[in-house]
Image (cartoon, rainbow, N blue to C red):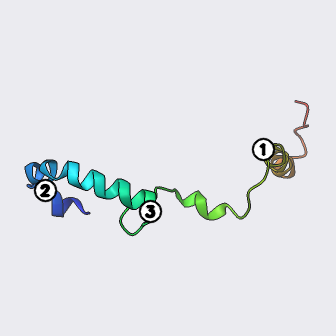
Amino acid sequence: MTSSRCHGRESELVGALDTETATYQRAFLEGDFDTAAIFAGEAVDLIDDVVQAAELVQRIGAAADARRPPSISATQ
């Protein structure tokens, strides 16, 4: 909902809060994400698999090593 649809209707919206909260919670539990929002940042598009934490840390370290200038050693 855009702010222009809400502006000036604050009392009406507060009055509908209980009903809309129940609607949202039901939609979330039923997987109805046309009604219930999914909050995710742009980085979600970078996820292409799910791995154990140890593997993820190794990948991050390897990526950092690959980008490290030759003048900086891994032990500094």
**Amino acid, disc 3:** Glu
Residue picked out by circle 3: 30
Percent across and percent down for residue 67 are: 82, 51
- At a point 15% along the width and 47% down the height, the residue shown is 14
Q: Residues within 10 Å of mark 1 (few under 14, many from 20)?
A: few
Separation (CA) of disc 3 from disc 2: 30 Å
Percent across and percent down for residue 71 are: 89, 41
Which residue occupies the foreground of this view, 35 or 43?
35
First of labels 1, 3 by sequence position: 3
Residue picked out by circle 1: 53
Which residue occupies the foreground of this view, 61 or 40?
40
The image's mark for residue 7 is 2
Separation (CA) of disc 1 from disc 3: 30 Å
Q: Residues within 10 Å of mark 2 (few under 14, many from 20)?
A: few
Q: Secondary structure at mark 3?
A: helix
Residue 29 seen by the camera: yes
- At a point 90% along the width and 37% down the height, the residue shown is 74
**Amino acid, disc 1:** Ala
Name, please, the residue furthest toward the top: 76
Name above or below for residue 35 compared with residue 9: below
Quadrant including the C terminus: top right
Which residue occupies the foreground of this view, 50 or 40?
50
1 or 3: mark nearer the eye: 3
Judged left or right of residue 61, residue 45 is left
Q: Residues within 10 Å of mark 3 (few under 14, many from 20)?
A: few
Image quadrant assignment for residue 36? bottom left
Q: Secondary structure at mark 2?
A: loop
Percent across and percent down for residue 20 are: 25, 55
- At a point 74% along the width and 61% down the height, the residue shown is 49
